[in-house]
Amino acid sequence: MIHIPLPLLAFSALCTIGQHPLRRAVPQPKESGHTDVATEVLTPRAEEMLQNTRHIVFIDSLVTHKDDFLSALRLTDDAGHFALPDRLFQHNADEHAFTTGQCAYLNPRSSAVWFSQTDTTGEYRLCAAYRNGNLWSLPQPLPGLGTYRYADCPFVAADGVTLYFAAETDEGLGGLDLYVTRFNTDTRQYVRPENMGFPFNSTANDYLLATDENAGIGVLVTDRRQPDDKVCLYWFLLEGLLQGTPYSPPETAADPESLRRAAAEIVCIADSQQGWHEKIAQKREQWAKALAHSTPTLEAAEKNFFVIADNLVYRSLQDFRNPQARNLAQQWAERQRQAHSILDELQKLRKQYAGRRNEKTALRIRNLEQALHALTIAQQKLAKDFRRLEHGDRHEEGGNKGKSLTKQEK
């Protein structure tokens, strides 16, 4: 497979700074074993969590491919955006490269990005980087949080202090578990993360939890009861999460323990909706209206940003001062769109070929890979040229001709 350098976001600037290494391929979290909470004997820790299962009203679900779930995860613009690290970071064969998780989160203004990366010991740390104008800080570990065997998919709620993320720990139920922590403004540290318990966690991998207060909806991504290559997205009403309402089986229930286990495992979303149908109808209408005025998550997160130099990023073509550089950047952006289209088609064809091999599909894949390679070479030259032209103009204006070029400009 041919990889294409895609500096689509200002965050790419973080990975072009001389002392900052580039990313490697992403490892998968460990398999969990997929124990069914509804039927299996639980550990004492899991049994304690089971008794504290929250009452969450689920309104919809969708099964999708594990590698594509961000495309199906719709948030309103006010909730921020998720993005694929493969499209945020540039590929490099540096043996000292760090490893990132599988998704990053950007706040609504794209002024901050949260993600996970390995440290020198190979442990994962949750990090953040912040933008001030066109300048980005180097990523810094979130204060107060330790390291994990694996951590991923951070999400910051609308209050700006509540952080949800997935991690593999000895205290979890199995596989990846979801945790919540909050930033203490007095100590300037995050407090000790808490396991979110049932039904958000399971003995399978629970990848992500996000809240969209503008729509009044939350979303959970998990692979419980799914094939190895699938995940399920569950959308739910926010009230149960924000209010922490405990699940209480009906007093008339013949087997309340079985009902509690079914609620913990999300065996049937219709069971969670009893007595909530009017509220669900209202929330669906609110949700649809909110999404109608929003941009799809990946599309919004991956708008073209132009990396000019170390910690200098343009957010639009209008930021260019050199007309020739602006024209080259516009050509680069057009090829970027073509590359995305090819990548999307390649992804579909490779899945199709994996299920049913035939020479016609194989030939189409080879032709697209050659086209993508040609685009890669063209983009690299365009990027080098527009950076050199624009960077030179800025030096002349600032009287700082002696500044060295970045790695991308050499």
Image: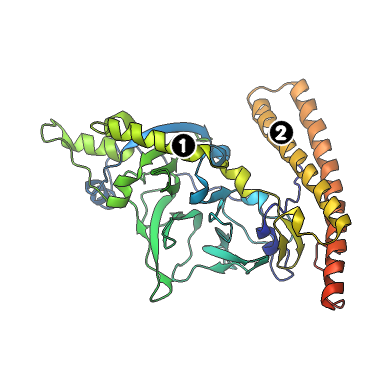
| Residue 32 screen position, x and y as percent | 43, 44
Residue 289's disc number: 1
Residue 321: % across, % down: 82, 62
Is the residue marked by circle 2 packed among few (<14), some (14-19), or many (20+) residues within 10 Å?
Answer: some
Q: Nearer the viewer, residue 255 or 185?
A: 185
Of labels 1 and 2, the one closer to you: 1
Amino acid at dot 2: Leu
- Of all residues, the one furthest to the left in this rendering is 252
Residue located at (79% from left, 33% from top)? 368
Left or right: 188 in relation to 353: left
Total of numbered circles in the picture? 2
User: Residue 165's image quarter?
Assistant: bottom left
* Residue 74, above or below 278: below
In terms of secondary structure, where does tag 1 sit?
Answer: helix
Q: Tell me if I can see residue 40 in this picture.
A: no
The residue at 28%/44% (across/down) is 42
To which residue does mark 2 refer?
346
Which of the two discs, 1 and 2, labels the residue nearer the N terminus? 1
Give above or below for 209 relative to 109. above
Quadrant of res 1: top right
Closer to us: 48 or 109: 109
Q: By what rule are the colours in the image chosen?
A: rainbow
Crowd class of label 1 (few under 14; some 14 to 19; many from 20; radius 10 Å): few
Label placed on residue 70: none
- Tell me where residue 370 appears, x and y as whole percent: 83, 37
Question: From the viewer's perspective, is 221 left or right of 307?
Answer: left
Q: CA distance from mark 1 to mark 2?
A: 33 Å
